[in-house]
Image (cartoon, helix red, strand yellow):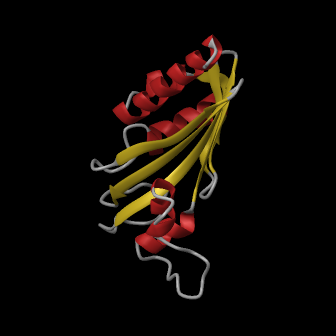
Amino acid sequence: MLSERQQQMVALFEKHVGAELAGDLDTTMDTMSDDPHLNHVPTMAGGVGKDGVRAFYRDHLVGKFFPPDVKMVSVSRTVGEDQIVEELFISFTHTTVIDWLLPGVAPTGKAVEMVVAVIVGFMDDKISHEHIYWDQASVLVQIGLLNPAGLPVTGVKSARKVLDPKS
């Protein structure tokens, strides 16, 4: 059972993600602390400080998160005393520029399935940071930019195995 604080953290995180997807920059930023940071670890895209995070959200993420056909499925959520870890299965067709995920890569029209782990920190009832991880090699294999031959990468299979461990 979640404590009242944990329930508040979950509600704030859900409000934050909803605002990102809806293209509502002001609400997205209202959920954040005065000195937040955001790091998409595989590409190092993000920002530091209120102005840096706001600029990143405005120019690269809020309302531009994913192509229109994106589907997100929550796989698991762990709620601690001051952070949430969310595991998501995400699928989409790479029909638009997604520069936080694939910087410098034009749309390929290829289908992508990926698993993302988001670590969200909280301080003073606001989001203080987000660290976002995914298997970039598997994404690159799926869009045709990385040949998996002879490499320890799997493409779409790694994401699908999270949804179905027997696959």
Where's residue 83, x and y in %? 67, 30
Position of 123 relative to 156 (above/below): above
Measuring from the top left, give residue 21's x and y in whole percent: 38, 35
Q: Residue at x 50, y 54 (%)?
A: 115
Q: Is residue 144 visible?
A: yes
* Residue 109, image x, y percentages: 29, 66
Asked if 134 appears above or below 79 in the picture, the reply is below
**Rendering coords of residue 158 (x, y %):** 51, 65
Pick whichever, 158 or 167, lies toward us.
167
Q: Nearer the viewer, residue 94 or 83?
A: 83
Residue 33: which quarter of the image? top right
Q: Residue at x 64, y 53 (%)?
A: 41
- Specify the quadrant that holds the N terminus: top right
Residue in view at x 45 percent, y 61 percent: 160
Residue at the farthest top position? 4
> Farthest bottom residue?
150
Q: Quadrant of residue 46?
A: top right
Q: Is residue 64 left or right of residue 80?
A: left
* Residue in view at x 52 percent, y 73 percent: 154
Using residue 26 as the reference point, say whether residue 67 is left or right of it: left
Is residue 102 in view from this perspective? no
Numbered label tally: 0
